[in-house]
Image (spheres, coloured by chain):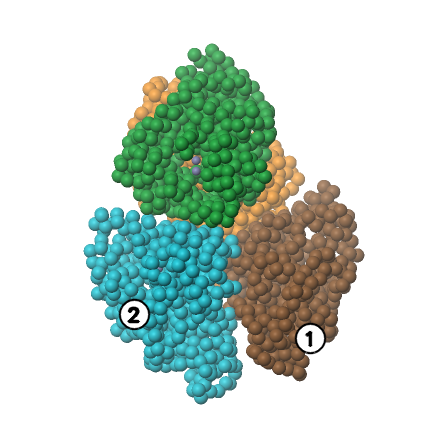
Chain colours: A brown, B cyan, C green, D orange
Amino acid sequence: MSTVIKGGTIVTHDLTYKADVLIEGGKIAAIGPSLSGAEVLDATGCYIMPGGIDPHTHLEMPFMGTYSTDNFESGTRAALAGGTTMVIDFALPAPGQGLLDALDMWHNKSGRAHCDYSYHMAITWWGEKVFDDMAKVVDKGITSFKHFLAYKGALMVNDDELYSSFQRVHDLGAIAMVHAENGDVVAEMSARLLAEGNTGPEAHAYSRPTQVEGEATNRAIMIADMAGAPLYVVHTSCEESHEAIRRARQQGKRVWGEPLIQHLTLDESEYFNPDWDHAARRVMSPPFRNKMHQDSLWAGLSAGSLSVVATDHCAFSTEQKRFGVGDFTKIPNGTGGLEDRMPMLWTYGVNTGRITMNEFVATTSTNAAKIFGMYPRKGAVAVGSDADLVVWDPEKEKVITAGAQQSAIDYNVFEGKSVKGLPRFTLSRGHVAVHDGEMRSQEGHGKFVAREPNGAV
Amino acid sequence: MSTVIKGGTIVTHDLTYKADVLIEGGKIAAIGPSLSGAEVLDATGCYIMPGGIDPHTHLEMPFMGTYSTDNFESGTRAALAGGTTMVIDFALPAPGQGLLDALDMWHNKSGRAHCDYSYHMAITWWGEKVFDDMAKVVDKGITSFKHFLAYKGALMVNDDELYSSFQRVHDLGAIAMVHAENGDVVAEMSARLLAEGNTGPEAHAYSRPTQVEGEATNRAIMIADMAGAPLYVVHTSCEESHEAIRRARQQGKRVWGEPLIQHLTLDESEYFNPDWDHAARRVMSPPFRNKMHQDSLWAGLSAGSLSVVATDHCAFSTEQKRFGVGDFTKIPNGTGGLEDRMPMLWTYGVNTGRITMNEFVATTSTNAAKIFGMYPRKGAVAVGSDADLVVWDPEKEKVITAGAQQSAIDYNVFEGKSVKGLPRFTLSRGHVAVHDGEMRSQEGHGKFVAREPNGAV
Amino acid sequence: MSTVIKGGTIVTHDLTYKADVLIEGGKIAAIGPSLSGAEVLDATGCYIMPGGIDPHTHLEMPFMGTYSTDNFESGTRAALAGGTTMVIDFALPAPGQGLLDALDMWHNKSGRAHCDYSYHMAITWWGEKVFDDMAKVVDKGITSFKHFLAYKGALMVNDDELYSSFQRVHDLGAIAMVHAENGDVVAEMSARLLAEGNTGPEAHAYSRPTQVEGEATNRAIMIADMAGAPLYVVHTSCEESHEAIRRARQQGKRVWGEPLIQHLTLDESEYFNPDWDHAARRVMSPPFRNKMHQDSLWAGLSAGSLSVVATDHCAFSTEQKRFGVGDFTKIPNGTGGLEDRMPMLWTYGVNTGRITMNEFVATTSTNAAKIFGMYPRKGAVAVGSDADLVVWDPEKEKVITAGAQQSAIDYNVFEGKSVKGLPRFTLSRGHVAVHDGEMRSQEGHGKFVAREPNGAV
Amino acid sequence: MSTVIKGGTIVTHDLTYKADVLIEGGKIAAIGPSLSGAEVLDATGCYIMPGGIDPHTHLEMPFMGTYSTDNFESGTRAALAGGTTMVIDFALPAPGQGLLDALDMWHNKSGRAHCDYSYHMAITWWGEKVFDDMAKVVDKGITSFKHFLAYKGALMVNDDELYSSFQRVHDLGAIAMVHAENGDVVAEMSARLLAEGNTGPEAHAYSRPTQVEGEATNRAIMIADMAGAPLYVVHTSCEESHEAIRRARQQGKRVWGEPLIQHLTLDESEYFNPDWDHAARRVMSPPFRNKMHQDSLWAGLSAGSLSVVATDHCAFSTEQKRFGVGDFTKIPNGTGGLEDRMPMLWTYGVNTGRITMNEFVATTSTNAAKIFGMYPRKGAVAVGSDADLVVWDPEKEKVITAGAQQSAIDYNVFEGKSVKGLPRFTLSRGHVAVHDGEMRSQEGHGKFVAREPNGAV
Ligand SMILES: [Zn+2]
Ligand SMILES: [Zn+2]
Ligand SMILES: [Zn+2]
Ligand SMILES: [Zn+2]
Ligand SMILES: [Zn+2]
Ligand SMILES: [Zn+2]
Ligand SMILES: [Zn+2]
Ligand SMILES: [Zn+2]
């Protein structure tokens, strides 16, 4: 069956033009004037854009014997509701666990996904088995490897492990990724804060000042440079980190920074809310920053020194957050955002003039597709590409509220924000998952996307 | 009649993939596997790329009662021979002359062009007539306005005129361009050098140190910022100028820098050649720089802080150069380069690993098309785009020599350089202008390209 | 007669230690413990510092047929009241007037000065006579030459004149100075604002955005670099200008920046006061800036990228300011500050921890003495130095008010500010000009200070 | 007995003037014209400067069961021969050893010193005892604490230890010091090089690229900033490290960089000498760099972003160096330089115009005295200061050769270099230790210098 999107304006990362889009067999079959098909979607007044790609989610992530509340079912449903048609999640091996084992565990979780997905593989320990497994993982289409410089005693790797892994990444033509915070200093600061009786959520922010992030970002860049590995820095939240990325890029190093929609639009004042639940729900790492840092992130998006807007979607319920009452270090780190990323970025970015529509597409979709080796299959409006599309109505408005969201948790960190610019239709490989505000997505429709190494971005 | 390019690998500014290209009616009709057409061009082992766009030429430019030797006929023929399928030339009104008059004069010259062309309009004086004419010129598809901060007493405008013109450019949704050298200081330095008996070609370089260029670039950027005009800086030749552009871009300003292929590959030692002719043939403004500045330009291309590689093709014969014997200020400024730009950049950039193939396409073609408002009609390998294409053979080699060139002048500043990477075919709107090294271009085939204002680059 | 300052702590630009100071014949005769002399000044609890040097004043400056209200009598009296023991004023030749003539006019005005003084010579036009006079002026001990890049049609010089003069400055071993604003753009912006009906004092600020200052600062630095002249940039008020100075200094260029106490402590909101008089009294060039720019200036003082805090004291009465009712371009530019510079900088700088006491001494006195060729005669607490000293009481407080000031004008731009840190005694060549709050200065006591060229700062 | 230095020109960090210097009781008693004393030293044609201070030496340093060859006797004799009148050595506690114990060991070694000396205390492990001892060490006048980020498994501390120690340094008003190289990466690279058969001295340089130094410098700065500790970075050898220091200083952070005379004048080509001994004798950490990095260091000295020139004098004989035949990681790290630092810096810095004489004094003496809390007792030519002086003859020349040196080792890394500018006299607290080229220094004359915390540099 064919579908045609008629009457809209196509917006890609570098073009804006009026044309119809014909979809057959889940792929874009034609782009041009006056196309026709069996099903017609009216895009009058709308922009037809590549569906969003969120390359940073943690669905059903194991934590303290339980799991983050949004799983591949509710998480990808939320994604589609907000115009995002693909997520890349993180497979996290336990210490000593083989990478292929971990991959199997993640494949087991993702069967219910409503949209396409892929994985990054985390390197949480080091050894010959990990070294060997990395090649096998790349063969299976997982070409990006995440490293944690924080979470000491858990996920964190040391600098010699980091350097060894980055060299392996280089040899395999893959991409290195890094969560950049100095775990040693964070641990020391956290212990001190607790010892001094600072146990509330605001102490989480005190324990992770911007210097720990700037330092670790610079360190990862230097080590990646020695290893010859391209580097993707997740959740860039502050000027210090952004400065290190800018400096590296200006020297011709292949480094990318990823601000989150949360850091772009929310600030540290959230942690001073007297309601423990309010503050704890916003606990994530890095924490929200002040407005000077926000300005730096927005400038980076328009200047091109920051490349991708993501969510780090890792949704814990209020009940789960309360594990940390009396000890902020036990509050599970993470917030939601999958459904809100694109409307929030459009509202605060495009509607305010900070970024152009083309930059919106680049930072929500195309850049991620290019960096992570799946362009133009994903991230493009082009003949032959997967028909992962969003038909964006710039006049559609709503007020964000947990009551109306797809996510399984009981709150939303953007509660009460008005957004203008929302999907009229979202298509996942041609299937109309969102139809004029109505969810028609199918559990299990999503498929794993194998990605290519040796990209030329 | 249809033409199909078969067996090649398409390389665009952001994609590399194997596909055939079908051309009908001078446009790209289809891209895909196993296409067929009436005429078949074998691209086996080759890259199919958008034809080059050189946005900086001076063909048949009036000078001291004569004209630069390469005109639209020989100049565009040279362009096609080297894989370039479009040029943008500069219409230069005389003092007091209306812009539309000047435009007519340039249209009269361009009738013999072998490939497509457009114009930039120079603002060489200021007044109400110029202000009014600017809107009419934009209506005719000329959406970029050039300003000279050098050539005092001739083309140079003062800062108040510059600011006024930049405001007008902003109002019209056009692009401001600038030749950035401090004309006051150059004039003073030149007079002093002559007074001290420094009359040879090397004094030309002494009279225009990098500071005069860095200063003027920074000044133009600041004034453009106040006026709200996007700014294109022609012939960026040194670190000081590049630094000003980098700094501006990092602040989110819309500024682009254009290194020339000459500055990327030749250096100041040329002026110390004891042969007056040798040195004088290389006299252009800005002059060639030292290797530190070259390194800065190459780094800028790969880091993205510099956007376009051009030629400033303005070819004077040795006889014309000799007007300046005994007084370097009378040596006509300019060199050739149209035929050599792409092979030289490929050889010294792609073959050495300094830039990728995609960056080659971006800087020789696509970026110029985007900046100057004609993308994706030009600068793209896309269905519906003009079939301005080059089929690039990375194994084809030659030694550059004036004896074998299309240009009408009697020398070549790249004489003796070996290049590897040359066109197998060059197509101008589907017409095969270069066929396996043989020139089949047609005088008069080229057409004027009207461009759009209000670009979103 | 001898004087001894007992019981205090000496604070210089690089030392803090307890010692007495013995003064004989107007010079420091001894420094050490337990000194005795005829007159004893009790410095218990106080800091003994070099008297302030304000290298930027305009006393009795000619303007529209009248003069700035504070002359050498009231101005230097105000200086001493605030701990400043020397000023450097600007001799301003009229167009065509010889430099020696202008110097005579300034010498005629300065006879009533209460404290020592010197002059900078302004280069307001260019010609052989100016070229020749410059050497004679240096011989008379005036070794710094000021250039205006603003005030088009009046004081402004063009870039070729600037370059010629800077070369002459280099040859004479003198210092180049510059008022850095792009006069062409200011004139154009001012005309446009008036044409649009913006006639009030706030339009003065609109007509001189930070870009015009940053641009001109960068230009002056580049031209000074080509001429080999050290450069002192007066009234650095914004980040753009500061950035240009930082960049130059980091490259080893001899460039200094001078923030004014007004720009450090007052901001642009002053111009939005609905009282015309309030706003007009604060009209000066450059205008006050926003808090981001203030932060940049304070950081520069502590980082050492900015060198001297001055006042640009040029006091016009409210009546004089009202020449500009209905046309902001006719409001005389200038504010007072001589009496308030040191207490304000101490209060907002030292008391807040932004700068150390030693940095206070460096930026109010010693750096100016070094740069302008009179160290350690001035700016030092050293045996043999002139006994220009201030005994500073860090506990002394007052509220600034025009009613209590020495200045002859009828208002004070710092009206209502509380300061903590004031002179207990101020000594001019050993004479106690301020004695515990009481003015004992002598009209005519001040003498001209000839300065040395070829400094090694 | 009194001594007078007559007929010379005093050069301090900020003054140049003709005067005699009278010395009584080991201190400067008077400065002025026509002084007289019992002993007269003729300084005609010479500069009288503060004696050099080398704040970075390792005399008789324990290593693999032996000691570095130059001890406090030969090392301080070499110092005086070259115009240096004070050294600061590093007390290095063994793992688990108390700081006071280590201090006793160092006091035992220093009894034979010819010139004054002090110590820095190294923090080589962390625990409550170290925490407690730090206060006692400060009470004894040792106010600077060194930390190694390299030498994994030996001296290296981890980031949490570093942060804890820096906080303690802050609380005690002391100075943090850091050897900045990423020890994890160095260890990994070294192992890999050995495994690949790269065992020679040149592999030492390969194992420590500039990135490992730049990274660690940036990390130490960030952590010091969080702890509020001023930071002194020893042996800054490359642009990456210098950039981190510049950036920090520009933000107002109290950070200083120390290039070594070796890195300023020797480059990496030394390691490619086919003579194993030649290369191994130059093995130190960081290794010598290329000329681009040298240029960066020289620019830093004149721009003020680098503060002190030291030697890291740690002299091993060729026999000791040969411990590392077949395994570069076993070559003892270190070179000499104490006798050559000042003549080499004068020759390559002052004589070439890169730095002024005043900057020479600042970087060889005064800055170290200020930073390390002993100014103006040391580092000054001032009444009351210790008479640690050098009378510098700018016309005196020699060729450096191991055969003529004071150092106990059998070679000199500057062998064959011609220097112009040498001591005529060197005085240690008034004692003439070097008299017109003749050594008259006294073993045991040197005394420990206790230093002050809470400096205001
Ligand atoms: Zn993370
Ligand atoms: Zn995450
Ligand atoms: Zn030009
Ligand atoms: Zn041109
Ligand atoms: Zn001024
Ligand atoms: Zn002024
Ligand atoms: Zn070391
Ligand atoms: Zn050392």
Q: Which residue is mark 1?
A: A432
Q: What amino acid is labelled 1 in the image?
A: Val
Q: Is residue D199 above or below residue D226?
A: below
Residue at left offset 27%, top offset 61%: B332
Q: Residues within 10 Å of mark 2 (few under 14, many from 20)?
A: many
As helix, strand or loop, the secondary structure at mark 1 comes to strand
Q: Is residue B310 above or below residue B326?
A: below
Q: Is residue B319 above or below residue D415?
A: below
Residue at left offset 44%, top offset 87%: B1
Measured as percent of width and height from the top left, residue D42 is found at 31, 25
Does mark 1 have its CB less than 8 Å from ligand 2? no
Q: Is residue C291 left or right of residue D304?
A: right
The answer to whether residue C355 of the structure is visible from this angle is no
Viewer-nearest of discs 2 and 1: 2
- Residue B70 badge: 2
As helix, strand or loop, the secondary structure at mark 2 comes to loop
Which chain does tag 1 point to? A
* Quadrant containing the N terminus of chain D in the rendered view: top left
Q: Closer to the camera, D287 or A415?
A: A415
Q: Closer to the camera, D71 or D150?
A: D150
Residue positioned most to the bottom? B38
Residue at left offset 24%, top offset 57%: B330
Choose top left, top right, bottom left or bottom right for residue A138.
Answer: bottom right
Which chain does tag 2 point to? B
Q: Residues within 10 Å of mark 1 (few under 14, many from 20)?
A: many
Q: CA distance from mark 2 to mark 1?
A: 58 Å
